[in-house]
Image: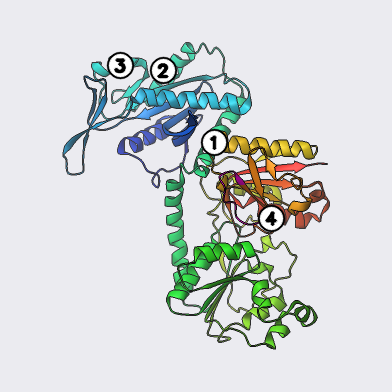
Amino acid sequence: MAKMYPEDIQNYKHTASEAFFYEKLRDQLSAKYHCFFSIRWFDKVDGKRVDSECDFLVFDPGFGFLTIEVKGGISIDIDLHKKWVLTERDEEGNLSKRELKESPFSQAEKSMRYFHDSFSEEYLQSFNGAYGFAVCFPFYQVDQKIEDAAEKDLIIDARNIDNLAHRINEIFHYWKNKNNTLSPFSSEQKQKFISMVNKQISLSAAAGALIPIKEKELQKINLVQDNIVDFLSNYKQVQIVGGAGTGKTYMAMKKIRREAYGMRKTMYLCKNPELASFASNSLSDINAECVDFQTLMLRYSDESTIKSKGYFDAISEQRHEKYDAIVVDEAQDFSLDEALAIRLFLRDEHESILYIFLDENQNLFDVTYESAFAIDLPPYILRYNIRNTGEIYRYATEDTGLGNETKANMLLGVVPEVRMTKNRIQTISTVSSILNRLVQKECVNTKSIVILSDVEYNTSVLAEETQLGQYKIIPSGKADGTKDILFRTVSEYKGLESDVVIYLTSPQHREIDVRARKKEDYVAYTRARYYLYIVHQNN
C-alpha cells in the first residue's frame, strides 16, 4: 500500500474521479511510493502571482516523480478550436458540457516543471532522477482524437486503471529513457525532494492557497471544542489544561461570547498586553472587557501600594468593578497573590463564572502555580494540538522534552529549518535571505511572518537594523505596511500565533538555566502554524 499525503482526503475538496484515483493509487502501489494529493503551487509571472494546482504527485525513490492531472466526467473531446470540452452528468442525471481553461497535459507539464525547477533552486543542485507527467481519465477509454493531441504513452484510462502499478511503471520508464536517466538518484535527494514537497504544502497554506482546506479541518475540531464548552457550562468554575496549540484561547473567547450574550458582565483577562489586544479585536462585536492584568490592577491602586502590600491587599482596600463571568487565559503566569486578587472581582465568590485556561509548560516567569485560583474540580484536559503542523509540534516536543502529553495533528508540513550563524553579520544576512525567499519566491504575505527573539529588540542582533533590505522591522505597534515585519520577544508573543516564525536566539540563550531555556524554546516553536526557521547565533 502506497504512502498517501494526506492519509485521508475526506475533508479535502475533491471530485469523484480524484477520490477514485486516490484509492487506486493507495491500494495498488507498493509502500515504496509516496503519493501527494492536491498540491497548490504558485509562481510569479511578470511580477504577478500565478496560482496552480497539481492533482497528484507520485514519487518513486527508484525513478523520480510524476505529476498527474485527473479528468473525470462522461467523456472528453477537443472541439474545432482545439478547446478541451468535458461532458459531465449532474446529480439529477442531466448532461452538460464544460470547456477546460487549458489542456490537462499542459497543466500536468507545468506542475512537473515547477517541482523540477524548485528542487534546483532550493538545493542548488540538479535533480538526478527521472521526472515527467501524465493524465488520467479513470472512467472511460480515450478516443483516437485525443491520442493525436498528446503522446499515447502519457495516458492512463479505464483500460489500465485496474493494473495501475504496471501502467505507472511504464510511464516512469518512458520518462527515464526520455530524460536519459541511467541510474537511480541518491537517498539524500529522495529525502530532499519529499521535504521540498511537504514544504510546498506548508508554505501554500501560509500563502493562503490552502487556507480553505485548513479552515475546513479546523471547523470540525472547533465543533468538538464548542461541544466541550457546552459540556462544561454545567460547571461555574473550571480549569482547562492543554498544551500549546490545543485551542485554549479559542475556547476562552467562545466562553466569553456565550456569557456576554447572556447579558452578563464579562471580562477576558491575561498577563500579556498583546494577547489582550488580540482578544479585544476578536471580541469587538460584543460587550465584553478584554484587559491585561497589570492594566486592571493599576485602575484601582498604584505601583508603590501594590509593591508594599501585594495585589490582594491593595485591591481589597479599594472599591472596584464586579463581574458575573471572568475568563483567565495563560493562567500559569499568575502567582497565588495575583490569582486571589482576581477572585475579588467576582460578583459572587461561588456562583459567578470563573474559567481558567493554562499550560504549565509555558510558564516563562517561574511562577509556582499550584492551583492558585482555588478551583475544587479536577481540571479538564485538552489533548490534541490544532495549531501547528505535525512536523512543527513533534519537533517542539522532541527538542524540549515538553508537551508530550499533547498529540500532534495530521496536517502535513515540513520539519523546521535550523541555521547556525557565527556572528551578527551572518545572522542578518541569513534572516534577510529567509525573508526574500518567503516573500518573493513563495508569495507569503509579510503579515503572516513574525520574527521572535529571546531578548529585547534593543539588545538583539537586529537592534541597529531598522531595515532588512526592503523590509522594515516593527518592534512595537502594528505591522501595517506591505513590507513591515513584526518583531517580538517570545514572552510578548505568548498566546499568539503566526503562519511563519523566524526564531532568533542570542549567544546568551545557551547560558541560561536549561529548564527555563527549554520552556522558552517550546513557546517560540509552537507559535508557528506552518513554517518555522530557527537561527542560532554563536557569537
Judged by depth in the image, the label closer to the viewer, 2 or 1, is: 1
What colouring does the structure picture have? rainbow
Q: Residues within 10 Å of mark 3 (few under 14, many from 20)?
A: few
Whichever of labels 2 and 3 marks the residue nearer the N terminus, that label is 3
Q: What is the CA distance from the residue labelled 2 to the residue labelled 1? A: 34 Å
Amino acid at circle 3: Ala
Q: Nearer the viewer, mark 1 or mark 3?
A: 1
Task: Decide which of tag 1 and tag 3 comes sooner along the chain.
Answer: 3
Reading the image, the residue beneath label 3 is: 149
398 is higher (above) or lower (below) than 56? below
The residue wearing badge 1 is 442
Q: Quadrant of the N terminus?
A: top left
The residues tagged by marks 2 and 3 sit, at their Cα atoms, a distance apart of 20 Å
Residue at the (54%, 43%) spot, across then down: 445
Please, what is the three-letter code of the amino acid marked with disc 4?
Answer: Val
Q: CA distance from mark 3 to mark 4?
A: 57 Å
Residue 259 in the image: state x and y as whole percent: 47, 75
Residue at 68 percent across and 84 percent down: it is 315
Residue located 46% across and 43% down the image = 210
Compared to residue 256, the image places residue 523 above or below, namely: above
Residue 467 located within the stretch drawn in magenta? no
Please tell me whether mark 2 or mark 3 is closer to you in this view. Answer: 3
**C-alpha separation, residue under disc 2 versus residue under disc 4:** 53 Å
- Image coords of residue 516 (percent x, y): 76, 57
The magenta region covers: 476-484
Q: What element does badge 3 sit on?
A: helix
Q: Quadrant of the C terminus?
A: top right
Is there a contact, CB below 8 Å, between mark 1 and mark 4?
no
Amino acid found under the numbered disc labelled 2: Glu
Residue position for label 2:
170
Q: Amino acid at mark 1?
A: Glu
Label 4 sits on residue: 490
